[in-house]
Image: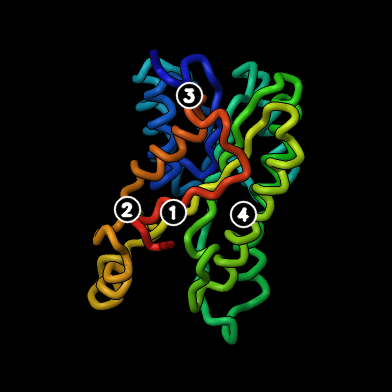
Amino acid sequence: MKLLTGKVAIVTGAARGIGAAIALKLAEQGANIAFTYVSDSSAEKAVALEQEIISLGVKAKAYQTNAGDFVACETFVNTVLAEFGAIDICVNNAGISKDNLLLRMTADQWDEVMNTNLKSVFNMTKQVIRPMMKAKSGSIINMSSIIGIRGNAGQSSYAASKAGIIGFTKSIALELGSRNIRCNAIAPGFVETDMTHYLNEGEAGKAFLDKIPLGRFGKAEEIANTTLFLASDLSSYITGQVISTCGGLNI
């Protein structure tokens, strides 16, 4: 039997990369998928992913919405509840990076990263916990980063947003554990996606690679596998934790 048969999962920022891999992995295990994308340029990929998920024999729908906007999240979650009937899993994956040295960073750049990476987690979690509390069950999975644990020069806004997700995750786990709602975070290391194309560029990529004990960059599917574990009953006694899926970078 599949691990998530009949469950309904939300995945934010899922038109490509890690988000798309997560949506597919959960669908392969029987979950119905509601996922978001934000830009018009991602619409074609979102529609293609929607059709690929449907071909797996589950329900799927792509929604163009901004997870960093509180009202938009409220509307989105209400729509998902009306169309899917429940929300069992919420994967807060939406994220961006606006790398810059602090000396050169603008307030707008800082705010954009915080809204997309951190405020979106608040927005979505705030909305999904009501139906989860009613059902007395749920799994919330927040995508942090190894950078949120270690920090990285030139990524202060990204690191701060991802560190904030860890603190938020632990607090929500404490608040909602008595309602049988689990909240965990994943801290991916360097994963090959469109967002991290620089990993394969010359000396910069080699410098990152040399720090990874497993000797390679991660794959989006490997982050999806960790997400599946936390979404399923295989992790039924795990909450408030940060799983570093990083090839040993955090040792």
* Secondary element at image label 1: strand
Q: Which mark is in front, 3 or 4?
A: 4
Q: Residue at x 76, y 40 (%)?
A: 175
Q: Residue 41, how many percent across, how many down?
A: 45, 49
Q: Residue 203, how many percent across, how many down?
A: 25, 78
Can residue 64 be spotted in the picture? no
Q: CA distance from mark 3 to mark 2?
A: 27 Å
Sequence-wise first label, 3 or 4: 3
Question: The residue under label 3 is which amino acid type?
Answer: Ala
Q: Which mark is residue 128?
A: none
Q: Which mark is residue 166?
A: 4
Q: Residue at x 63, y 77 (%)?
A: 106
Q: Which mark is residue 218?
A: 2
Which one is in front, 190 or 113? 190
Question: The residue under label 4 is which amino acid type?
Answer: Ile
Q: Which mark is residue 60?
A: 3
How crowded pointer 2 is (Cα within 10 Å; few <14, some 14-19, many 20+) is rated as some
* Secondary element at image label 2: loop
Sequence-wise first label, 3 or 2: 3
Q: CA distance from mark 3 to mark 1?
A: 26 Å
The answer to whether the residues at label 1 and label 2 have Cβ atoms under 8 Å apart is yes
The answer to whether the residues at label 3 and label 2 have Cβ atoms under 8 Å apart is no
* Secondary element at image label 4: helix
Q: Residue at x 52, y 68 (%)?
A: 98
